[in-house]
Image (cartoon, helix red, strand yellow):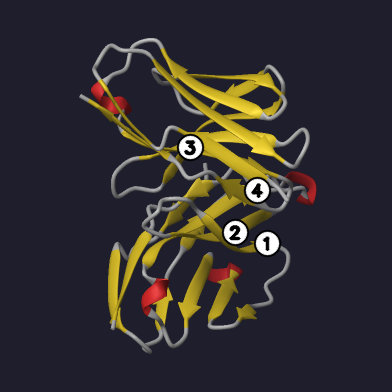
Amino acid sequence: SQTIHQWPATLVQPVGSPLSLECTVEGTSNPNLYWYRQAAGRGLQLLFYSVGIGQISSEVPQNLSASRPQDRQFILSSKKLLLSDSGFYLCAWSNRDEAFFGQGTRLTVV
Amino acid sequence: AQKVTQAQTEISVVEKEDVTLDCVYETRDTTYYLFWYKQPPSGELVFLIRRNSFDEQNEISGRYSWNFQKSTSSFNFTITASQVVDSAVYFCALSEAPERVTNAGKSTFGDGTTLTVKP
């Protein structure tokens, strides 16, 4: 069966520090991968998605970047965090019909 | 541009009551998919259902039922005989489907409805 791992679960980082969130998928090959952000009390906003190694599409302009160095690995990064980067970040993978989400990372920028 | 509206921010019911969560969507696409997800306090999203725009047949799964009405651009979700374990945030989402090929992960989400079921 397929599983998705996302870490860390929580993170507190100072403004201006770098960020690296990692997501890996097991049990499937060549999945579509996604990073979503959920602001408090709001729905999910798609940040990045990838249909293959090295292929990244950005949905909204922001202070973040994404990379896919391996087929089942998706990384969300920032060189310098802003206060507005705080939120709940969810990684997901999908086949055509369903999306499967990780446990999420709660990021607080202080 | 796509948009999903969940007008109910919070709903509180007593156990065993029926509850309906509303979802209204906007899209210019002629083919699309609609989803409902459940987000329990632990945070991960749990897939509940997917419906496509070319099939308006309503669906029932146990205590859950979904009413898709293309004429009103609505995809409402009803929980019958609610239970405390149904307490969660519920999201409605929309995904475009060119040539009827969906990309389930690339979705526009509503802001969610927080459902609290009291014992």
Give a yes or no on whether discs 4 and 1 share a subunit. yes
Give the chain letter at badge 4. B
Residue type at mark 2: give it: Leu
Whole-Å distance between the Cαs marked 3 and 1? 24 Å
**Among the two numbered marks 2 and 1 on one chain, the one whose residue lies closer to the N terminus:** 2
Q: Is residue B29 above or below residue B117?
A: above
Give a yes or no on whether discs 2 and 3 share a subunit. no
* Label 4 packing within 10 angstroms: few (<14), some (14-19), many (20+): many
Mark 4 lies on residue: B104
Classify mark 4: helix, strand or loop.
loop
Classify mark 1: helix, strand or loop.
loop
Whole-Å distance between the Cαs marked 2 and 3? 18 Å
Classify mark 3: helix, strand or loop.
strand
Dot 4 and dot 3 residues touching (CB under 8 Å): no
**Among the two numbered marks 4 and 1 on one chain, the one whose residue lies closer to the N terminus:** 1
Give the chain letter at badge 3. A
Name the side, left or right, on which A100 lies relative to B44: right
Mark 2 lies on residue: B34
Mark 3 lies on residue: A36
Name the side, left or right, on which B30 lies relative to B114: right
Dot 4 and dot 2 residues touching (CB under 8 Å): no
Dot 2 and dot 1 residues touching (CB under 8 Å): yes
Whole-Å distance between the Cαs marked 4 and 2? 9 Å
Whole-Å distance between the Cαs marked 2 and 1? 8 Å
Please identify the quarter of the rendering in which residue A85 is found: top left
